[in-house]
Amino acid sequence: MTGNMNTLRQAATLAPLQSSQAAIPESPESGRSTVCVLGAHSGVGVSTVSANLALCAHRRSLNREAALLDLNLHEGDLHLLFGLEPEHHWRELMRDPLVMDPTLLMSVLVKHKTGLHLLASDYDGLREAAVPPDKVGRLCKLAQSLFSMVVIDCGTVLNPAVSMALTSATTILLVVTLDVPTLRRAFRMIAALNTLGHGGERVILVLNRYRREDHGLLEEAEALLGQPVALSIPDVPEEAREAVESGHLLCADTSGGVVVRAYERLAAHVMDAKQTPAAHPSSWRARWIQRLWGDAA
């Protein structure tokens, strides 16, 4: 680890941009997208959605370099999904006196065979996971300046570091499944996002593991949450099993079934701000369900 830290310090020293303000623009450039993926509950597949979305977005951007940041401070394991063993992680960028600049960041990222860049997490929920929010904000701005597409796996907890990352997002995906614990927590999380100033049209719902026979339940969920599901990822056990057995992510290849096509539609959706849906007008029935749910909470 000492050798790695020295390498990072040398890279920071040799970086041509020493001014922290000059290296990072105040806002993302036109045409650049930053998508924060947030899970409404543990087990909804937020890491799988983040990884497959990043791969599809990378291809859709005509293979211009894209980045995937693993900010899951409790179960960060995206590098395992990609079959990578990175030498550097988030924690190294958070340490002083390292100067965070383009050269340092690029030296920490690991590149997948598809061309996607990954910033791995070494947080596992078993150790102190305090990450300075100001450094997270700076890191997100830096990534935006270097990549046309940035996807951030934010896990399932709205801690200060995640909240800071959300401020940089052009789109916030809230991943849900159609079970009572997840929908109950999604209702609370939407309220929390609104309180923190992250609500509104930037937040879109993504339903994972959707089955056609659940259509009626989906309508009830939309009424409860007060907004439509923007896109559904179908539950196709055969495709999921094939991916597990082959040891690679579904969207790592250009060919695929209905699940891959769903992720491709999701990538197109988040890369075009004009496609962001407005919330449905709240009907009396939706307001009634929300009030009952809120009282029960």
Image: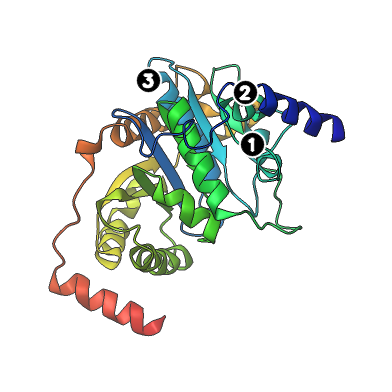
Measured from the top left, where is residue 280 in percent x and y?
Answer: 16, 57
Give the quarter of the image for residue 269. top left
Circle 1 crowding by C-alpha within 10 Å: few under 14, some 14–19, many from 20: many
Q: Secondary structure at mark 3?
A: loop
Left or right position of 276 against 212 = left
> What's the distance in space between the residues labelled 2 and 3, CA to CA?
28 Å
For the image, the number of numbered tags is 3
- Badge 1 or badge 2: first in the primary sequence: 2
Tags 1 and 2 touching, CB below 8 Å: yes
The residue that mark 1 highlights is 99
- Residue sitting at the far front: 19
- Badge 1 or badge 3: first in the primary sequence: 3
Q: Secondary structure at mark 1?
A: loop
Q: Please tell me whether mark 2 or mark 3 is closer to you in this view.
A: 2
Residue 15's disc number: 2
Left or right position of 287 against 57 = left
Identified by mark 2, the residue type is Ala
Residue 120's disc number: none
> What's the distance in space between the residues labelled 1 and 3, CA to CA?
30 Å
Residue at the spot 44% in from the left edge and 23% down from the top edge = 58
Residue at the spot 51% in from the left edge and 43% down from the top edge = 138
Measured from the top left, where is residue 212 in percent x and y?
Answer: 33, 46
Identified by mark 1, the residue type is Val
